Each structure stands twice: as structure tokens, then as C-alpha cells.
Image (cartoon, rainbow, N blue to C red):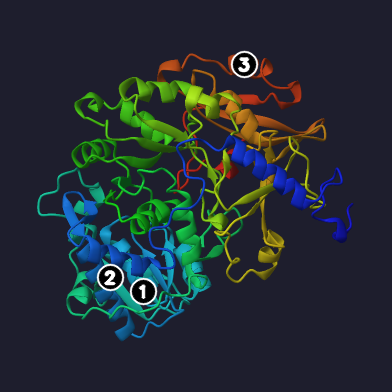
Amino acid sequence: MAKASEIGRVCDGTTEESYLALLRQLWRKNWPGGLKDTLQDPMPGLDLPQRLAAWARAEPQKTAIWFYGRSFSYAELHDMSARLAARLVSDGIVAGDRVALVMPNCPQFTIAFLAILRIGAVHCPMSPLAKQRELEHQLKDCGAKAIIALQSLMPLVESCEGNALGLFYRTRISDALPAAAELPVPPMVSEEEASGGTAVDFFDAIAHADPLPAEAAAADLDRTAAINYTSGTTAYPRGCLHSQGHMIYTAAANHLRSDSFAETTLNFFPQFWIAGQNHGLVYQIFSGTTLVLLARWDPLAFMMAVSSQRVAATTMLVDNLVEVMDHPRFAEFDLSSLRLIRCVSFVQKLGIEIRNRWLSHYPGAVLSESAWGMTETHTANTVTIGFQENDFDLASRPTFVGLPSPGTDFKICDFDTGEILPLGAEGEICCRSPAIFNGYLNATEATQAALRNGWLHSGDIGQIDEDGFLHYLGRKKDLIKVNGMSVGPAEIEAVVAEHPAVFAVAVVPRPDASRGQVPVAFVQLLPEAASATESELVQWCRSRIASYKVPEVRIVAALPVGQTGKIQKDILKQQT
């Protein structure tokens, strides 16, 4: 066991400083051409509401949000958020107060987000799919003083006990739709109730308030501006404290392509989720681009929107991409405007076959695998764009998650001692970045365990190879011990996912009397490959990984998926 004074020294005797210097040399050597290697910020020093005001002055009629055929200009977005800010202030909300948002994607979410930040209050997004127990916990935990919720969710909100809520605002998705929608609207819209009850109507509140005057100086970019709850791997989700500085850094680190400030983007990821907050709120205001917003995922609405609005970039699950290509009306739409598709592999993995299938239709597109990130880091702390030539990113190693974003450092440490491990060794991914959270809300011990000397100890298993590329191998809590040897589920999942019959896979441990644990791979097959057998998949693994890593295989009709699209491994563990 290393002494505390030795932490930060590499196990081969070199210092952390020399270790990071080597990684930066490798970073410069391997940084992809066509990407800026420094952050590009069009409005340095300004907070998000001030950036909105600047875009509204520069291009007032430019569409900020396109929602099923209704356009909200930058001037309208600025005016509405300023009016809502004034109403919140008149109702007693002051800087530092927490305001909860419980609604699906809609322009009201963006307006509220910007109004909350404008007055220095704290944005607290919560899932509209939450049950009473979950919502009650988060409202109590953050101490929300006000809530803005979907009209149909008001009975649930009002049933939550023991919170400090004093102000209720309600809205409906249909309130933001055009008279005749140009895309199929979600079924939940037709089920919305007419406005009523004691809560304040969202758009009425805006209409009867004068705009809050703009502040001359930007807000403190380091002050807590949002409480983003994790996916709930602990008993309850923890609230991560984030600032506008974190948001702006993350946006800059994801605008490294020369054309990224001019493109129209599309988002359907839930805006309450950290990835949806980035792609559906922050990035647009940072870059002054047009956002095509969908209330939820729908393949037909997606294709219609991309085609009609000439969307240039989007982020989607691999499952969504395959669903689009499998859609019976796929050939009807021109999706050639999509130059960049960031693919997130929660269930189905991005493979060369899927990439080539899309490129056979649209060869000018870039399909990149998702980067490494977590709620604590404001997501997307590595860069995978630019490594698609000859499928380097997918063919080199299936666990590839790219190079650090400019301004971010990684190191791989021993989980127990904290010593930095040499390149090629597997250990804990530790990250240092301008977007690292300020800590967990009401959880001092958890914060101290995660944040040490400026580094986030992620709990993720990873490796930095000899070229400086980061590889993600899974969560430590998911690590499987077979005869005392550590097996990362992500490695097995990547191997199984390469089989042409596999749609999706998840690996969990099963207790075993003789070996301690054994890996079990739950596999969902492609519909056209239903004849594949469990023994066939086992043999596939035997020829590709060490024998102790070869899993038991169980073919299932479908894998359990949570609200954010992640596979629920706790459920699978109960089935081993």
C-alpha cells in the first residue's frame, strides 16, 4: 500500500508531471486534422442569458427553435425568457433559489432554463416519467421553491409531501405547437387537459409581465447554476452541482469543427437529462444556431424534420439510427444534409456494418461513436470525431473513446492506492477538466471520495494505450472476478456485439461456488437472425478472448431499458 505522500507518483518512479507531459505529446501527435486544437468561444466571458441577448440583437429574426412547424426567433426567445424571469422575481424567487422543471422537451423548457439562469436561480431538471417517490426525493433534496411542470403532471407534483414548494406553474406541449403541425405529434399531446386549477399558466405569466432589464455584468460563471441528478446507481440519484462555466466549456469543447457554428441541429434527447441539456439547451445558445426540437423520439418525425429543415448534425442512440434505416419510408426522404451523427451506444453498439450501411446511402456523413463522460463531468470529455478514416475508431479496439478534449487531462490510477499506472495498464479513469462538478448536493462524504486534489475519481475502469487514446472498460462496481482475475463487462459486450446476429448485449456477474463469479451475457438477437444459438455465441467468444472471460450466453426477447435508454443491469443480475 502506497503512503499518502507517494500518491501522484507513477508506479515506475516517474512523476505525475512527466506522465501528463508524455500524454500531451501523444495528444498533439495524434490530434485529428480538421479539428481545432483550442477552444473557440464566440463570446468569451458572457453567461448564457447574455449570449442569448447578443444573438437576439445580432440576428433577431433568426429561428432559435423550430418545434413541429412553429418557429421561435432569437428575439422571441430572449423576450419570453426575460418576461418569465420578471414574473419569477415578482413571485419572490431570488438568486440561489432552486426551481424545478418537470416536463418533456418543449420550447417552454428552454424559456424557463434561461429565465432561471437570468435571475441567478438554480435550474433543477427532473424526469417527467418519475414516480411520486422519486420526484418527492429530488424536490426535498434540492429544496425547490418553485416548480414548472406539464399540466398533466400537476396531480403528481401536488401529491409530493414535505417539500418547500410555494409556486406552481403549469404548461402544455400543445401551447407551443402551430395550428397545423408539420410533423406527427406525440400521442400524449392529444391527451392533454385544458388549462385549469390553481397553478399559474406558463404563457399567461409571460404575457402579463414586463421583461426583466438586462444585467450589465455576466453572472458569476463559477456559481452553482444547475443541479443535475445522476442515473441513480446509488439508493437515490445524487444531485451534481454544476455552473454555467461548466456548461460553456462543454459547449466549446464540442464545437471544434469549423462549420459547427453555422449548422442546424436536431435534439430529441430529454432536456432533463444532462446529455439533453447539452444538445437541447446549452449548445444552441452558445453557438447561435437553429435547434430543431422534438418532444420525443419518433423515426418518421425525425426524417421529416431533417429533410424539411436541412438538419446538419444530431446525436442519437445507435438503436435510433437502425430504426431509421429499417423504416419502410426511409427512401422517401432526403437526409443528405446530415453531415455529423454522434452515436450513443447504450443498447446496440455502433459497428462497422451499421456505419457502412448508412454511408452507402449518404457517403458524405461522419458517424462517430459517443465520447467518454458522465453527469459529474457534464458529459463528452473526449473527442472521437476525426478518427473515422478506415474505421480506425471501430476497428482498432472496441473500447475506444478517443482523446481528451482540449483543456482536459486523464490518468489511470490504481483503485486502492491512487498511484498512476503505466500506459497500457487497466485501472480507474481519473479526469481533470474545467467542467468537473463542484460536488454532490447534501453528500459531503461522497464528494470527498470522488474529488481528490482537483481530480474526479470516476469509478470507471479504463486504459490509456501507448498512443494516448482512452479506452473505457466498464464500471468498477460491475467488475467481475473470475478465479481472482478481473473481467470488464464492456470488453465482453464489445466482442459479442460484433457477431452479425446480435442486436444488443449486456454482461453481468453470476455467483459461482468454484470460481467466485462468472460472466453471463444476455443477448437480444436481430429479428432476421433468430436461428443463432447460445452455443454458437459462446464459440464466437472462445475464438476471440481468454477462456476465463468467455461468458455463459442467454438469449432473451428484449433487454430491460430505463428512462434514459440505458440497460438496467440490476434487473438482469436478478435473473442470473
Q: Earlier in the sequence, mark 1 or mark 2?
A: 2
Measured Cα–Cα span from mark 3 to mark 1:
56 Å
Q: How many marks?
A: 3
Measured Cα–Cα span from mark 1 to mark 2:
8 Å
Which of discs 3 and 1 lies nearer the camera? The answer is 1
Residue 234: x, y in percent?
A: 61, 56
Q: Is residue 211 above or below residue 136?
A: below
Query: In the image, 28: left or right of 530?
Result: right
**x 83%, y 47%: residue:** 14
Residue 384: x, y in percent?
A: 51, 38
Q: Is residue 447 above or below residue 217?
A: above
Which disc, if any, is residue 126? none
189 or 162, which is in the foreground?
A: 189
* Crowd band around label 1 with a 10 angstrom C-alpha radius: few (<14), some (14–19), many (20+): many
- Badge 2 amino acid: Ser
Q: Quadrant of the C terminus?
A: top right
**x 64%, y 19%: residue:** 541
* Residue 480 visible from this viewpoint: yes
Residue denoted by label 2:
81
| Secondary element at tag 2 | helix
Which of discs 2 and 3 lies nearer the camera? The answer is 2
Which disc, if any, is residue 540? 3
Measured Cα–Cα span from mark 2 to mark 3:
56 Å
Residue 289: x, y in percent?
A: 29, 52
- Badge 3 amino acid: Trp
Residue denoted by label 1:
118
**x 27%, y 41%: residue:** 311
305 or 215, which is in the foreground?
A: 215
Q: Earlier in the sequence, mark 2 or mark 3?
A: 2
| Secondary element at tag 3 | helix
